[in-house]
Structures are given as C-alpha cells and as structure tokens.
Amino acid sequence: MEYRKIGKTGMSASVIGLGSEHLDGKPYAVVEETIHAALEHGINIMDLFMPGDEVRRNIGKALGNRRKDMIIQGHIGSVDLSEQYDVSRDLPTCKRYFEKLLDNLGTDYIDVGMLFFMDSDEAFEQIYSNGIVDYALELKQKGVIRAIGTSSHNPVVARKLLETGIVDLMMFSINPAFDMTPAETDVLSTMEELSAQQYVTIDPVRAELYKYCEQQGIAITVMKTLGGGRLLSAEHSPFKKAMSVPQCIHYALTRPGVVSTMIGCQSARQVEEAVAYLNTPEEQRDYMDIISGYQGELSGQCVYCNHCQPCPVNIDIAMVNKYLDIASLDTANIPPSIRQHYKSLAASGADCIACGNCEDKCPFSVPIIKNMERAEELFVLL
C-alpha cells in the first residue's frame, strides 16, 4: 500500500480508501469480511456518512481492537429523521447523531469530523449561524475529533469554506466527467443527462480548487471516483468509452491535493479489485485515450498524464509541472512545503537538457522545456 500525508494533521492515508455506503443494510458477516479485507490490504481510511445505528454498530464491531488502525471520516449533519438519508443543520440534532456515532462505533474519538454535504451558500450560512462550526471546533479542542473536514460536490461553496481556514480535509467528487462539467452544474442531479458534447476542457474552477488545496496543505479524499459506475460502461459513460477501475483511480490520484480515493466495496473480492490498482502497469492506468478527444481548449495546460515520459534524465515532469502550477497561484508566497517537495525531487528543472522528446509526446502542446526553466527559477533562484 502507498500512503500520503493528510495535510497538516500528522496523519497519513492509504491511497485506496474504503467507501462504506454499500455496507448499509448488509448482514454483519458482509461488513466483517469487507472491513477485515481492507485492513489486511493496508487500507487505513474510510468514510462513514450513513446515519443508521445498525451499520455503524456493525462497522465498530468489525474494527474491534483495530480501531486505531483506521482513520474514520465521521459526518456532522448526516441524519435519518425520515428513515432515509437526510441533512440537518439543527445543532441539537447534529449533536445527537454525532454522539450516537461515537456510541455505535464503541469509540471515544473520530479522526475527521466532517461538515456534511456543503453544497450551497445556504448550508454555509447555516453551519455558522446555527453554531455547528463552533461545535466542530469545540470537538477538536477536546480531542473528540482530530481534524475538521467537509464533504462537497460544489467547487464554489467548497472553496468558500476552505478559505475560512478551519478545514483540514475535504472529501470532493472527482472524476473526468465531473471535472469537465461547468462549476455551476449540479453534477449529482444531472449525471444521467451528461453529454460528451459539453466537454471541452477541465473546468478551471475545479482545477483551481485542487491546486488551492495542495497550496494550503488541505488534503482531498475522493468520492464518486467511478462516477457511480457509469464511467465503467461504454453504454452509460458520457465519453462513450468504458474506463477501467485503475484508470478512474489514477485520474483522481493525479489531481493536486488528493491523498486517497474512497472506493465503495461490499466484499473482500471488491477490496482486492480496488487495491489491484497498486500493481497495475502504468500503461494500463493511462486515461488519456478516454478524455483526449474532449480536450480541445486545453492546449498548453498539463493534466499530469505522464505521456511525456520517459525522460532521458529521469525528471518527473508531471510532478514538476504540478508544483509549478501550485506555485503560480501566488508566486510571492510559495508554501515552504511545496518548495521543499520540489527540492527533494531526484531530478528537477535544473537537470533538463532541452532534448524536446517530452514536447513531441505531449498531447496538449505543453511548453515543458520552458516550464522546467520557470520551475527552477521560482523554487531555487528567486
């Protein structure tokens, strides 16, 4: 298993995480099999947004004395008052359900307390006016939660919340179809209607959100990695080509800020299929044959696809471009962590021999040689 640091929290997450929604309503034997398989394969992070008592108890029982081995994202505001998934911004209700989460799991702490379903300006106003943010901060101060997170599908609202400085982790919906959908689109309600004709380039608002997270040390965990399974079907995918699970995972993991993908599983076999990504050859992870036909306006922008490789002097070109993109958000205030990451690369922009092989291979005419020079200038010379 591979692990990435969760921003500034001191925790590290497995790049393959567990989405537990498919365990809801399943017998304990299924929950136990899935949780144990995840732990055996080194998965150490899971999302638990479901409000029901039974699934929470089953997960707590399955974790048993290995609770400390699993980072849990637990949500503040996820309720089932009408015996179905719902959202509450009522503080007493939120408290009651969060305290029940602790009790159901048989634990005295949640690793990441998530502000649930932050998809509208109204939700943003409510968590402040109703005292929910103060409640989350109090939980963190007391050590009941180790970090504050949020879940969102709306890049504009998510950015607004992140800029308050209280969020350590964001769970966000990331896949090629969503990323190429205009930021103002409600991707959850329109997934069935998405059409490849509307895809021209990665939406700049979404792209800037991911770069901002990396710049600020805010970790991203990914939901909807497989687009609800639609991206795995040529018939149902808006691209009219089927992506594989490794391609979907790799796309998400190559976005700036991303530390883990939450893959929904309900069996040991499905866990094994997800972690098989780690042993998938690079060429089978490549997603560019799926999305390259919809990138007409992306000329000059790196999408970190690694089609430029191999480099004769072993520069990780995609990584240099990623750090450069993040630094370019504010060249006067480059985060020390990003500068250090660049300087720790085995080969950097300074090693570029300007052979041009990379530019010949790049699908989007990225000025790689110029970018290597610019990176060295920003990170070392200035």
Image: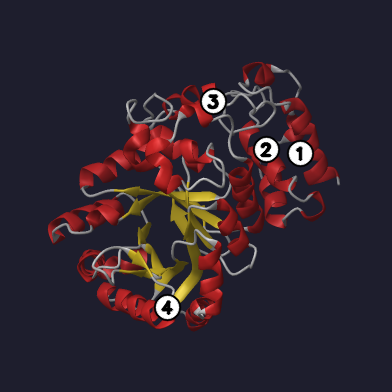
Whole-angstrom CA distance, mark 2 to mark 4, is 45 Å
Looking at the picture, which amino acid does disc 1 mark?
A: Ala
Q: Are marks 2 and 4 in contact (CB under 8 Å)?
A: no
Residue at the disc numbered 2: 320
User: What secondary structure is marked by label 2?
Assistant: helix
Looking at the picture, which amino acid does disc 4 mark?
A: Asp
Residue at the disc numbered 1: 375
Residue drawn at point x = 34 percent, y = 53 percent: 18
Question: Is disc 2 surrounded by few (<14), some (14 to 19) or many (20+) residues within 10 Å?
Answer: many
Residue drawn at point x = 22 percent, y = 42 percent: 269
Find residue 294 and name its label.
3
Which of the pair 100/146 is nearer the observer?
100
User: What secondary structure is marked by label 3?
Assistant: helix
Residue 361 in view in this figure: yes
Looking at the picture, which amino acid does disc 2 mark?
A: Val
Q: Is residue 340 left or right of residue 274?
A: right
